[in-house]
Image: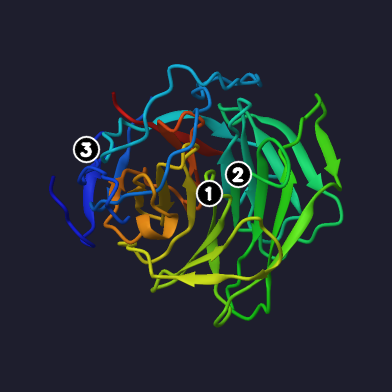
Amino acid sequence: MTRVGVTLVLVTIGALACGPTRSSSDDGATAATSTSSSTDGSSESESGSESESGSETSTEETETETGEDTEPGLTECPDVGAAQMQGVVSAPALGESSGMVRSRTHQRLWVHNDSGDIARLFALALDGSLLATVELAGADAVDWEALALGPGPGDGDWLYAGDIGDNMEARSSITVYRLREPDLGGVDVLAIDDWDALELTYPDTPHDAETLLVDPISGDLFIVTKGAQTLLYRRPAPLSSGALEQLPDPSFPSAIATAGDISPLGDFVLVRSHADAFAWLRGPGQTIGEAMLADPCSMPLVAEQQGETIAIDADGRAYFTLSEGTDQPLWRFSFAG
């Protein structure tokens, strides 16, 4: 397959995302126009069963994990179909979507606003309609920029809300709020005080960041910085407050990382900028840091007003995006085959 390195190429949404195959020894209903670039990647041991695929439905249903008939993880860059608009997110209070993640056990997305809002999460159905608002009672919201889902100190999935934005690069520490994924219980507004705060510091100087990742295999937490030089930092599991560890710079063929996610199996990592997105395949035995040293696959996006979210679907075979702004379309990109 052809690689383009850091050259940006205008492609059609249904175009092939090129890149080589993964090996255990590697490092690393509307279509619209997208910008992307082509490269490849690799990765670490894959976890057990996948969650059931997220369907395009507005109902809030519980998904189950059977461990049967699961698809294998990605071994090469996927063909990605045309972007499908799932609906329009019209919740008046959700005007600056800056973090988003797909639940692996429910038919819902979790989203939060950029800086200026209170500490709260919005639960959306898969058509973009608002299900409920979850407030983190007593939590601060200096500059919430990213949202992740992963293992935690107890059973089930845990949400990680990253108060990691720092436009002036002056914060002495940043905070990641962690809470077990809540049961909505049929209410419109839910206040939760059962959360904990991870206070983190960089080992060098403060950085602005909008990308938070939690590895479903190891439980490690990662922050990808935003800037001309993309940096990668890690906090190992079991997670606690403390200093981040700087890892070798990832191979990110763009300038501004605005969001990211790790697939439920842990077999690929997805990071986007405003205009393009990239996926690193992760071979058996690889760490996230090792996988992100390789050239990534190019992944299509639509032209958005200000795209700062990306969330891999529960089956690991698609991803969602949502722009900042009011009345924005919710897009879903499915892998072919």
The quadrant holding residue 292 is: bottom left
Q: In the rendered structure, which amino acid carries the disc numbered 3?
A: Leu
Whether residue 92 is visible here, answered yes or no, is no
The quarter in which the C terminus is drawn is: top left
* N-terminal label among 1 and 2: 2
The answer to whether residue 146 is above or below residue 231 is above
Query: Relative to the observer, which residue lies in front, 219 or 181?
Result: 219
Q: Mark 3, mark 1: which one is toward the viewer?
A: 1
Q: Which residue is mark 3?
A: 16
Callout 1–callout 2 Cβ contact below 8 Å: yes
Q: Secondary structure at mark 2?
A: strand
Q: Secondary structure at mark 3?
A: loop
Residue 126: image location, x then y, percent: 56, 27
Callout 3–callout 1 Cβ contact below 8 Å: no
Residue 32: image location, x then y, percent: 32, 37
Q: Secondary structure at mark 1?
A: loop
Q: Mark 3, mark 2: which one is toward the viewer?
A: 2
Q: Which residue is mark 1?
A: 215
Estimate how packed mark 2 is, as few (under 14), some (14 to 19) or many (20 or more) residues with alpha carbons within 10 Å.
many
Left-right relation of 193 to 262: right
Residue 49: image location, x then y, percent: 50, 28
Q: Which residue is mark 2?
A: 150
Rounded to the nearest angstrom, the CA distance separating label 1 from label 2 is: 7 Å
Residue at image coords 68%, 43%: 158
Left-right relation of 103 to 246: right
Query: Relative to the observer, which residue lies in front, 64 or 183?
Result: 64
